[in-house]
Image (cartoon, helix red, strand yellow):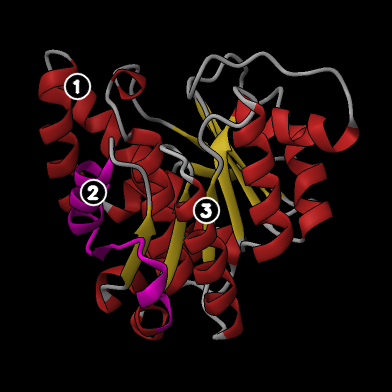
Amino acid sequence: MKQQILDAIHAVHASVPLVHSITNFVVMQVSANALLAAHASPLMAHAAEEMDDLTNIDSALVLNIGTLDPAWLDSMELAGKLMKQKGKPVVLDPVGAGASGLRTRAALRLLDMVRPDILRGNASEIMALAAEIRSADKISTKGVDSLNSSDEALDSARALARRFRCVVSVSGEKDVVTDGENVLVVEGGSPLMPLVTGMGCSASAVTGAYAAACENRLVAAAAAMAVMASAGEKAGRTAKGPGSFLPAFLDELYLLDPEDAAARVRILK
């Protein structure tokens, strides 16, 4: 596994993939800077009229429903379908799923209509989507913050992965990535990461870069989270608080030690 993660990291650094994000207003700059620091190239555009042209040059597409709008949702569905037709990867970040019916329905619509390659969210979001499908009890959620651990979300992640034939990446104190059968765990990061807006969304953007460079979606998703964990942990050692954490994180992402990142991924027995 370590060599596969290393290969994915080197592939991203060598190819500098163009990652198109239809994402929320709050995190656009943070996600764009994270992609640049991770040796990828960002593109932020949401007008439906240019999706056919842009998906011709995109390496990957990231759909993020953080500041949800019906017109943007239409653009997401259109762009997602075009990318899949062109054989290019799509990542979905169901920000705030479970917090409102609109968000939950939007995420499920994109899962059903686009069939993204990777679904990346926090534990509460993943559990809420799985619960909606099962018509089970609603899962506690507080806006975009997770009130559940990645361990608690593993069964839900497996169920979603099998249902939609995708890889599910769950962020938390430790990250869990599954294709419905195999499970990888990524350890690391910093307690400061949840205190900085855009860390989860940046993880989804970086996941797009790795999906573009690595055909094995399970490895791609795990590699992206390992890169985030490595950079986050190192930045946390020197940062005085959330304000100084973000620039330190971007520096560590740019100066990544591939060996350190790869060592953070293990196969769950």
Q: Nearer the viewer, mark 1 or mark 3?
A: 3
User: Is residue 145 shown above or below 4?
Assistant: above
SS assignment at label 3: helix
Kind of residue at disc 1 = Arg
Residue drawn at 26 percent across, 65 percent down: 43
Q: Is residue 86 magenta?
A: no
Q: Mark 1, mark 2: which one is toward the viewer? A: 2
Q: The C terminus is located in which quarter?
A: top right
The magenta segment: 27-52
Please state which amino acid type lies under the numbered disc 3. Answer: Leu
Horizontal arrangement in the rendering, residue 113 relative to residue 266 (left or right)? right
Categorize mark 3 by other alpha carbons within 10 Å: few (<14), some (14-19), many (20+): many
Residue under label 3: 73
State the separation of the CA atoms marked 2 and 3. Answer: 24 Å
SS under mark 2: helix
**Residue tagged 1:** 237
Q: Position of residue 25 (x, y in %)?
A: 29, 41
Query: Which of the two discs, 2 and 3, sits closer to the camera?
Result: 3
Of the image marks 2 and 3, the number of the one nearer the N terminus: 2
Q: Which residue position holds label 2?
A: 34
CB atoms of marks 1 and 3 within 8 Å: no
Cα distance between the residues tagged 1 and 3: 39 Å
Hey, which quadrant is residue 111 in on the image?
bottom right
